[in-house]
Image: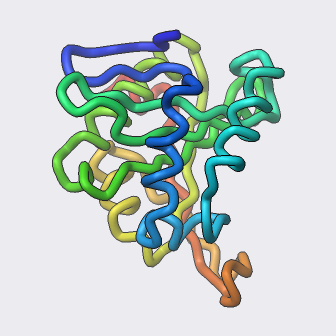
Amino acid sequence: MTLISSSTITLRHLTIADLPILTCYRQNPDVARYQSWDAFTQDQAKAMFEEMQTLTFGTPNNWFQVAIEHSEFGMVGDFGLHFVDDFQVEIGVTIDPKWQGKGIGKMALKLLLEYLFDTLGKHRVYAIADVRNEASSHLFLAANFRREGSFIENCFLKGEWCSEYLYAMLNQEWKSQ
């Protein structure tokens, strides 16, 4: 099911046919570096997909993955949407490395913000990214998110303490762009 689309980008629910693509780019060490997983298997993708099928999209306190599809290249990545409550959404983005640096992530993020703010009427959208993940920092700042704060060595991931940035945007900020 399509959530929102432009002439170039479509954001839609994942399908079972997407799982091999999802698994392939999530297995890439450069993608997994700042994520909670080390290796992402087809079985993990299937379990994630099946769990989402048991939930109503947008239910508070649940995560949902949304496919990012490019009109020419097909599925190029995904968004994780954590509907924190009725007013706030935490987002995460994963773009296949072969499509990074081409402006696709920024186009997709702007489309996602349009959906979350204009269609769903959310009050606040935020993202948390590892400070070493320069691509994520660049993406959120390019999409006009504010860097609201930083957390110093706040999470232990893959054998080391990591620091994170918090990025956010309010509905009123979105509308004033």
Q: Quadrant for the C terminus, please.
A: top left
Picture layout, residue 59 above or below residue 92: above
Residue 150 appears left or right of 56: left
Residue 65: x %, y % from top left: 59, 34
Q: Is residue 72 left or right of residue 18?
A: left
Provide residue 44's location: percent of width, then percent of height.
70, 49
Q: Residue at x 53, y 49 (%)?
A: 23
Left of 167 or right of it: where is 143? Answer: left
Front residue (pair 99, 103)? 99
Residue at figure coordinates x 46%, y 18% from the top left: 115
Residue 70 at x, y percent in the picture: 27, 28
Q: How many marks?
A: 0
Which of 141 and 71 lies nearest the eye of the viewer?
71
Left or right of residue 83: residue 94: left
> Residue 84 falls in which quadrant of the image?
top right
Q: Residue at x 38, y 62 (%)?
A: 137
